[in-house]
Image: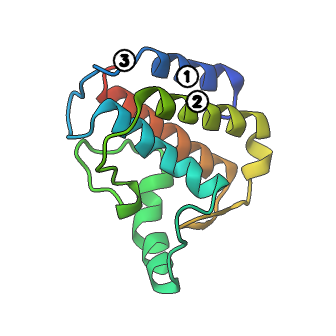
Amino acid sequence: MKNIFTKKVSDEVISRIEKLTPETKPNWGKMSVSQMLAHCCVTYEMVYTNKHPKPNAFAKFMLKTIVKKIVVSEKPYAKNGRTASQFLIVDEKIFETEKQRLIDFINKTQELGEDTFDGKESHSFGKLTKEEWNNMFYKHLDHHLTQFGV
């Protein structure tokens, strides 16, 4: 798995994002490109904002037991997989705004570095290693950028 915490990989991901246009169509799925960018921002919103309520104890137990391995492992996501309700983007978004928000989140995360994230509590899964944070960040971005052909 590529390391999103390195400048080289974060710049590579940003370069892929820069290839998107408001007219870019997905190879699968129903999201528009602006919705996909907003969807990718949710992972970072859960780290840097209080926009999304934390799951209750039962939900967090279920997330840690069932979902965590899927999200933080190196195994790629399947096409058209189910997503958590917080990640569903149903309204149309402004392409340039969402693109810049995502790029800013990627840059901020890379600048903070992997040591900042090693052992950091995640919104839904408890404490994660820097490798698990990397897998979660990179795999999600790579999945959706591939979905949109970049």
Q: Amino acid at mark 3?
A: Thr
From this view, report whether residue 101 is shown above or below residue 49: above
Task: For label 2, count other residues whose C-alpha is less than 10 Å away and answer few (under 14), some (14-19) or many (20+).
Answer: many
Asked whether 132 or 55 is in front, the reply is 55
The answer to whether 124 appears left or right of 89 in the picture is right
The image shows residue 35, relative to residue 73, as above or below, that is above
Residue type pointed to by label 2: Ile
Please state the horizontal and vertical placement of residue 39, each as a whole percent of the image.
Answer: 41, 45
Residue indicated by mark 2:
103
Q: Which residue is mark 3?
A: 21
Work out whether mark 2 precedes mark 1 in sequence or the reverse, and give the earlier one: 1
Q: CA distance from mark 3 to mark 1?
A: 13 Å
Residue at the spot 39% in from the left edge and 19% down from the top edge: 20
For label 3, count other residues whose C-alpha is less than 10 Å away and answer few (under 14), some (14-19) or many (20+): few
Residue 71 visible in this rendered orientation of the protein: yes
What's the residue type where badge 1 is placed? Ile
Q: Are marks 2 and 1 in contact (CB under 8 Å)?
A: yes
Quarter where residue 66 is shown: bottom left
Residue 33 position, x and y percent, is 33, 30
